[in-house]
Amino acid sequence: MKQYLDLCQYILDNGEDRADRTGTGTRSVFGYQTRYDLTKGFPLLTTKKMFLRPIAEELLWFIKGDTNIKYLVDRNVRIWNEWPYEIYKKSNDYQGETLEEFVEKIKNSDADSAFVLKYGELGPVYGKQWRDFNGQGIDQMQKLLDSLKNNPDSRRHIICAWNPAEVDNMALPPCHSFLQFYVSHDHKYLSCQLYQRSADTFLGVPFNIASYALLTEMLAQVCGYEAKEFVHTIGDAHIYKDHFDVVNEQINREPLQLCQLKLNKDVTSLFDFTIDDIKIDDYNSHGKLVGKVSV
């Protein structure tokens, strides 16, 4: 995935240094696009160790329409924990618990407990907008499935997570905010373009690439297509200043052969996929690289 390393290098060489909401500081460029040919392998980054399971679990959580971290915490997926914890720290119920103690309390509480319902909830984030846009019962995912199957040449194969009416009620406004799908003229291939308004290039982008490539593959299978291309268009592509060293280390690593995605071919409905239906073969990578999340 040289495309990704080129993005990192471009930001370091051409970006402008900016203050940001988190106080960490970034180097940023505005407007960048990469393309990934899904027929040549699954784009799970090889220049650092990646794990597909948390990526897939988050995607399944989106597809369910869930917005509470309880589902993820129960599966030891940590990617959303910091945001509700920061909200909890500002509440009168906060008693000095660490992030780990907060997460354990979520894990050890029932899904319908007052604590989970109040402090595990992220607001109307991705899953809510995908399955019940604006709280009006508009199921964008079902509409997408219907249009891909019944009107493949449409230019309206779209899912939008950015909802101005509800964005202020979200723990984190959608970064990957707009999806469009494209069926080839021979009705054989399905491609996806993501518009991402804000992209943490070291921590977030590798995750986002794999997530939406996976969604494209899943949609292709249940709609009778083959996945062809994932196009990633980014608004503010940035590297946090405390990631500069680790990004430079990654850039100096040589990309390895891409792995192969293996979906359970017996699954015919997008809503029937489970984590056991999603596998990869022949994944090889360089070692783990670590960077702090800026919240």
Image (spheres, grey):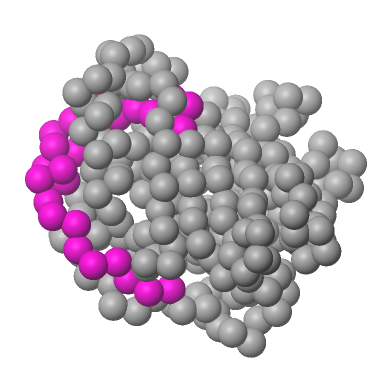
* Position of 87 relative to 105 (above/below): above
Identify the residue at horizontal 37%, vertical 68% (top origin). Answer: 41
Is residue 258 on the magenta stretch? yes
State the image coordinates of residue 85 (x, y, percent, origin top left).
50, 38
User: Who is closer to the viewer here, 156 or 75?
Assistant: 156
Q: Is residue 157 left or right of residue 75?
A: right
| The quarter of the displayed image where residue 223 is located | bottom right
Q: Is residue 99 left or right of residue 244?
A: right
Identify the residue at horizontal 48%, vertical 46% (top origin). Answer: 231
State the image coordinates of residue 200 (x, y, percent, origin top left).
38, 34
Q: Quadrant of the C terminus?
A: top left
Residue 142 can be seen, yes or no: no
Residue 176 can be seen, yes or no: yes
| The quarter of the displayed image where residue 109 is located | bottom right
User: Who is closer to the viewer here, 219 or 89?
Assistant: 219
Identify the residue at horizontal 28%, vertical 19% (top origin). Answer: 15
User: Who is closer to the viewer here, 53 or 31?
Assistant: 31
State the image coordinates of residue 79 (x, y, percent, origin top left).
45, 49
Please give the range of residues in magenta.
Answer: 234-261
